[in-house]
Image (tube, rainbow, N blue to C red):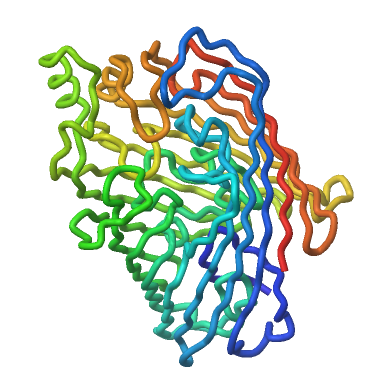
């Protein structure tokens, strides 16, 4: 059975209601647990700043437990709620690399478990004709049939990347790659609170071989904030065109995305100018004003064989204004391959290998070289070099509901600094789903 639509950071295909797979499902209840432990040995670093990756040997853990509860309130309307319990911190309190090594690590954390509500949304699917396809039950998805030509409206609290910039091989830090600049387009500064979620709406029009998406989303009140702007005065417009094709008999997708952010943000040039006048360290918060920043991303996924797929992402942002809600990346290219273990007799296992190359704009380089701080990076100085990352993982499926993943990342010029690193990052991930 083919999944034709899935909303959520995890498009996992197991559920408690598989008996509903071929009929319209009135409700759904699923859950997941993920634990990630990451660490690195000592690496070279002659100096450090407030947002530097700690050069000492360290290890951190994050855990999260999520409940996915949904109900069909009409023939084509669903409501979903995802309460979650989180605990732990990313390496160095989730700072020190623009392409941060764990998508399971948020920009806030706590030693004690805390509860939050990342998603509460309504989704309505309107049939526009075409053939009828069956969809299976999954997280944030009820089993039933859907017309191949349709409109999908999503409204409420969810993540921008639940709908935009998705990729079958690199998008889910609970099941595939983990590095931020691999699982997302690095220069896509998508609207979000410090946990990666926001309020907004999206509309998707699917017909034949293409889909067009558009959305309006709330940005955080201040950069990297736990609070969203309640007035929507600071907001993001995002659009995406998706093309579906077959290459040598194998399916693939090509997506082109564009976005415009409007918020009270500071430009790097203004921060440097102000710092020179006052003989101080530059800070974008000191020169923030209503301004806009825009960017674009290309996202390609291609099945190469029944058990092998590849992906490529390339993204760009203007880079004159500060990064606001994601991370300090102005140019990024990532590519990788994902292979199922059927070739070596382990069909439930997956091996992945990817690389990412991240860069800053010229204005951002000058700002960080002068000691400026950002969302994730800031060493107090900068000997600039592109941030280069390699990630490989092996996911071992131990049962229908349990996965253990071994992850390795190698980072050259972490936070774009030739004076620091390279860094070897080792990780293990335990994921359970029901």
Residue nearest the observer in this picture, 337 or 216 = 216
Q: Is residue 274 above or below residue 179?
A: above
Farthest residue to the right: give it: 345
Q: Is residue 427 above or below residue 131?
A: above
Where the N terminus falls, by quadrant? bottom right
Where the C terminus falls, by quadrant? bottom right
Return the x and y of residue 125 as percentages of the image width and height.
43, 81
Farthest residue to the top: give it: 46
Residue at 37 percent across and 16 percent down: it is 380
Residue at 73 percent across and 59 percent down: it is 432
Return the x and y of residue 422 as percentages of the image width and height.
58, 16
Farthest residue to the left: give it: 277
Return the x and y of residue 235 as percentages of the image width and height.
24, 55
Left/right placement of residue 364 relative to residue 342 reads left
Q: Is residue 212 above or below residue 393?
A: below
Query: In which quarter of the view is residue 289 placed?
Result: top left
Residue at 47 percent across and 32 percent down: it is 95
Farthest residue to the bottom: give it: 75
Residue at 22 percent across and 61 percent down: it is 232
Residue nearest the observer in this picture, 68 or 333 = 68
Query: In which quarter of the view is residue 431 placed?
Result: bottom right
* Count of labels in the image: 0
Return the x and y of residue 314 as percentages of the image width and height.
42, 39
Left/right placement of residue 250 relative to residue 122 reads right
Left/right placement of residue 69 relative to residue 432 reads left
């Amino acid at each position: 059975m083919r999944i034709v639509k899935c909303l959520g950071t995890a498009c996992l295909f197991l559920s408690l209601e598989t008996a509903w797979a071929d009929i319209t499902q009135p409700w759904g209840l699923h859950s997941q647990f993920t634990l990630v432990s990451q660490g690195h040995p000592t690496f070279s670093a002659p100096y450090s700043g407030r947002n530097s990756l700690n050069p000492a040997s360290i290890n951190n853990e994050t855990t999260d437990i999520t409940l996915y509860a949904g109900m069909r309130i009409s023939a084509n309307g669903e409501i979903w709620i995802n309460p979650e319990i989180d605990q732990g911190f990313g390496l160095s309190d989730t700072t020190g690399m623009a392409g941060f090594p764990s998508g399971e690590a948020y920009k806030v954390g706590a030693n004690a478990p805390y509860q939050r509500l990342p998603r509460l949304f309504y989704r309505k699917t309107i049939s526009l004709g075409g053939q009828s396809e069956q969809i299976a039950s999954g997280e944030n998805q009820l089993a039933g049939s859907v017309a191949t030509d349709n409109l999908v409206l999503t409204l409420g609290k969810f993540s921008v990347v639940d709908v935009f910039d998705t990729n079958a091989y690199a998008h889910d830090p609970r099941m595939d790659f983990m590095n931020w600049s691999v699982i997302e387009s690095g220069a896509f500064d998508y609207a979000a609170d410090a946990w990666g979620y926001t309020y907004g709406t999206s509309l998707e029009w699917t017909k034949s071989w293409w889909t067009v998406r558009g959305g309006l989303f709330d940005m955080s009140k201040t950069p990297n904030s736990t609070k969203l702007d309640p007035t929507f005065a600071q907001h993001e417009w995002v659009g995406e065109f998706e093309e579906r094709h077959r290459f040598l008999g194998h399916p693939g997708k090509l997506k082109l995305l564009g976005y415009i952010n409007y918020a009270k943000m500071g430009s790097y040039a203004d921060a440097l100018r102000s710092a020179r006048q006052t003989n101080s360290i530059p800070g974008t918060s000191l020169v923030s004003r209503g301004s806009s920043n825009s960017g674009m991303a290309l996202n390609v996924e291609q099945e190469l064989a029944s058990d092998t797929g590849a992906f490529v992402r390339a993204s760009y942002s203007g880079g004159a204004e500060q990064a606001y809600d994601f991370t300090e990346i102005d140019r990024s290219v990532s590519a990788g391959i994902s292979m199922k273990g059927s070739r070596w007799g382990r069909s439930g296992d997956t091996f992945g290998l990817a690389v990412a190359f991240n860069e800053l704009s010229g204005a951002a380089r000058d700002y960080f070289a002068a000691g400026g701080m950002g969302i994730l990076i800031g060493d107090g100085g900068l000997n600039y070099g592109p941030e280069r990352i390699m990630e490989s993982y092996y996911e071992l499926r131990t049962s229908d509901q349990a996965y253990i993943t071994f992850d390795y990342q190698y980072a050259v010029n972490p936070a774009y600094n030739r004076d620091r690193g390279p860094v070897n990052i080792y990780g293990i991930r335990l994921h359970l789903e029901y």
